Amino acid sequence: MAKVRAVLTQTVNVFKEMPDSVSDLGRLMGRLQDIRRANVEHHLRLIAAASAAGASIICLGELFTSPYFALSTDPMWLDLAEDVERGPSVGALRKAAAERKVVVVAPLYELDGATGKRFNTAVVIETDGHILGKYRKTHIPCGANERGEFAETFYYGRSEGPQNAPSPDILGQNPYFPVFKTSVGNVGISICYDRHFEGVVAALARAGAELVFSPAVTFGAKSRRLWEREFLVDACRHRLFIGGSNRKGTEKPWNQTYFGESGFAGPDGDMLPNLSNIPELVIADLDLGALARPDPSGWNLRRDARPGIY
């Protein structure tokens, strides 16, 4: 199997008319579509740049259409949620994927039209523009660290089980953790907080994932210390590639700084070199063919596991 050129974005909200104070967020009432439009257009430019650099697949950042609003609780942001199959963001991304011949993984704020519930959801779009399916974030954090609060449960709930109709494009029997059979390889998704739970990558690996994307919005000292380590251990343990993306920069009006450090962890315990000369993109060549070869360490963890005792 040839190498796959994979890309992550690491950027922040680009809407230029954000207020300077959280108390002034009300000024944005009625402007949410403008915020979404600015960020979608920004990411369409990044997709074009990634395609020009030879990308086969690109994963955008968690909740990429807006600032990370869960730093405070404000019901205004609930109106930003959209249909992830027929909404404006996915419509633009489907067109871009088809024009650029690139697989797009797009993490959005979802409004389920059938139930009225909201989710933190990633949509997978093939190179011909059709939607392979979606993954809804399974673990939703609510807490604070030394840098700030994250009140995500105010805005959306956790995955409730089957997210996709049966399809040959989706591998595995676990309804919570689908693996998507894309034209460049088998892709799983874990969104931000999901990465801390030991069973997530295990479930994706069992379903045949070769590449796991973990789009995140993360900050704080402990998160920074463990950022690469968690990905490296899981990539090595389950013999696959993991692409972890984080915002990079500061967003008004919360003035929270995100440390970035997006990158790809490989199955042999190393972070792959970033081939990008564009600050908002991380590019790596992934040798998916290597996953079928014996582990150079001599390990065979899948064969030698002891089911039922741990």
Image (spheres, rainbow, N blue to C red):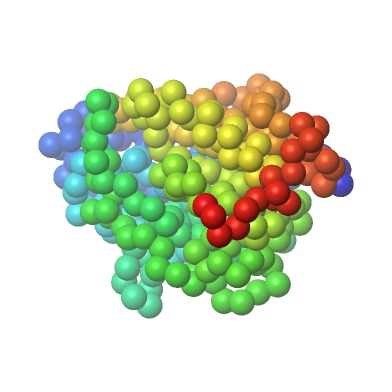
Q: Residue at x 35, y 40 (%)?
A: 67
Spot occupied by residue 58 in the image (x, y as percentages of width and height): 63, 44
Q: Residue at x 66, y 65 (%)?
A: 171
Spot occupied by residue 183 in the image (x, y as percentages of width and height): 76, 56
Q: Residue at x 62, y 53 (%)?
A: 306
Left or right? Give the position of 198 relative to 193.
Answer: right
Answer above or below: position of 287 versus 272.
below
In this view of the protein, which residue sits in the foreground, 296 or 235? 296
Choose top left, top right, bottom left or bottom right for residue 24. top left
**Outermost left residue:** 23
Choose top left, top right, bottom left or bottom right for residue 167. bottom right
Q: Residue at x 65, y 36 (%)?
A: 236
Asked if residue 242 can be seen in this view, the reply is yes
Asked if residue 188 can be seen in this view, the reply is no
Left or right? Give the position of 15 relative to 275.
Answer: left
In this view of the protein, which residue sits in the foreground, 136 or 11? 136
Spot occupied by residue 33 in the image (x, y as percentages of width and height): 36, 53
Answer above or below: position of 21 versus 188.
above
**Outermost front residue:** 309
Spot occupied by residue 11 in the image (x, y as percentages of width and height): 48, 32
